[in-house]
Amino acid sequence: MKFNEVKPQQGFEHPEENQLGIAKKTDTRRPRLTLEHLGKLRKMREIRKLEVEDRKQLFKRIYARPVAME
């Protein structure tokens, strides 16, 4: 229940009875990002960055100009 939905005669609900955080099939809200989610995203971004650097090094070796023969 949101604060603006509370009517003065109703009073306040107990946190156990609060249904706002429970997702339903019809909800279009995005899930909240937790610190755990953010940590996983950071690790994935770092791994992807390392993979791109490895790929760049490999391509440099593959497509490097051949050494001039004497």
Image: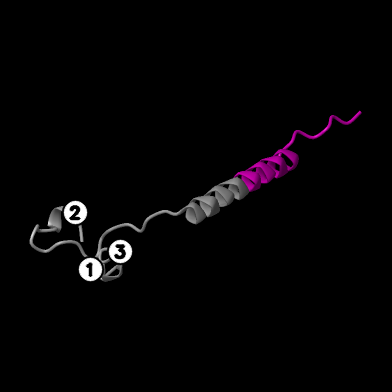
Mark 1 neighbour class, 10 Å CA radius: few under 14, some 14 to 19, many 20 or more? few
Residue span colored magenta: 49-70
Residue nearer the viewer, 12 or 46: 12
At a point 75% along the width and 33% down the height, the residue shown is: 65
At a point 49% along the width and 50% down the height, the residue shown is: 38
Q: Secondary structure at mark 1?
A: loop
Could you tell which of marks 1 and 2 lies nearer the N-terminus?
2
Q: Position of residue 70 (x, y in %)?
A: 92, 28
The single residue placed furthest to the right in the displayed view is: 70
Q: Which residue is mark 3?
A: 21
At a point 66% along the width and 45% down the height, the residue shown is: 55
60 displayed left or right of 15: right
Magenta stretch, main secondary structure, is helix
Q: Secondary structure at mark 2?
A: helix
Determine the image quadrant of residue 64. top right
C-beta proximity under 8 Å, tags 1 and 2: no
Q: Position of residue 3 (x, y in %)?
A: 19, 54
Please, what is the three-letter code of the amino acid marked with disc 2? Phe
